[in-house]
Amino acid sequence: MSYLKATFIVLALCCVGITSNAQDNKTFIPVNEPDANMPKLFSSLPSQIPVSINNFNAATTGRKAKDAPVQLVAGKKMPVTFNGTVVSTTSKYDGAIETTIIRLTNYEGATLTLSTLTDKEGNKTYTGRIISMKHGDVYELQQVNNEYQFVKKDFNLFVHE
């Protein structure tokens, strides 16, 4: 008799589980799918922009105050100017890593981040990016053949959610 009672309870629970609307298609968990149709902010600019190291030093050195205006001119054949305002400067590990964050004024919503990494011998390397979370293109600073240049990349390939 107890087997019959247990079987009946299991069947009743299965029926309730099948007919419940917990798996209703009207409710769903939001998933952050990448938007392939984001507008391009840098569509008028070339895919690679060579940058002089002297321009980095001029943009980052002596800009410790907030709201200091900055102008970074990039490109040798076709000069590209990035105007902005210093939002933050940070120095860590006794100056081994210095980062300057600049909010660009001529590209709405874009932020330029420049970092200077200094090793124990005094050699400097630079990293950086220009990114806007509302647009579909990004510039990443890369060193190619001992020269630095901003290389245009797709936002969805650059930023992973």
Image: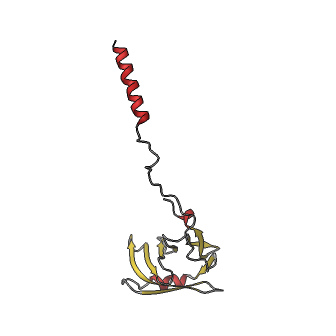
Residue 105: x and y in percent read 47, 83
Image quarter of residue 79 = bottom right
Above or below residue 5? Residue 107 is: below
Quarter of the figure that contains the N terminus:
top left
Q: Residue at x 38, y 26 (%)?
A: 12
**Looking at the image, which residue is at 37% across and 15% down?**
4
Residue in the foreground of this view, choosing between 45 and 90: 45
Residue, far front: 19
Q: How many marks can you see?
A: 0
Place of residue 91 in the rendered image (x, y in percent of width and height, measured from the top left): 39, 74
Q: Give whichever of 17, 106 is nearer the camera.
A: 17
Residue lying at the far top of the rendered structure: 1
Q: Is residue 86 left or right of residue 160?
A: left
Q: Residue at x 39, y 32 (%)?
A: 16
Instruction: Look at 38% across and 29% down and name the residue there.
Output: 13
The image quarter in which residue 24 lies: top left
Q: How is the image coloured?
A: secondary structure
Q: Is residue 3 above or below residue 66?
A: above
User: Compared to 79, does 138 lie above or below?
Assistant: above
Residue 147: image x %, image y %? 61, 77
Residue 74 place in picture, x, y as percent = 57, 83
Q: Is residue 139 shown above or below 1?
A: below
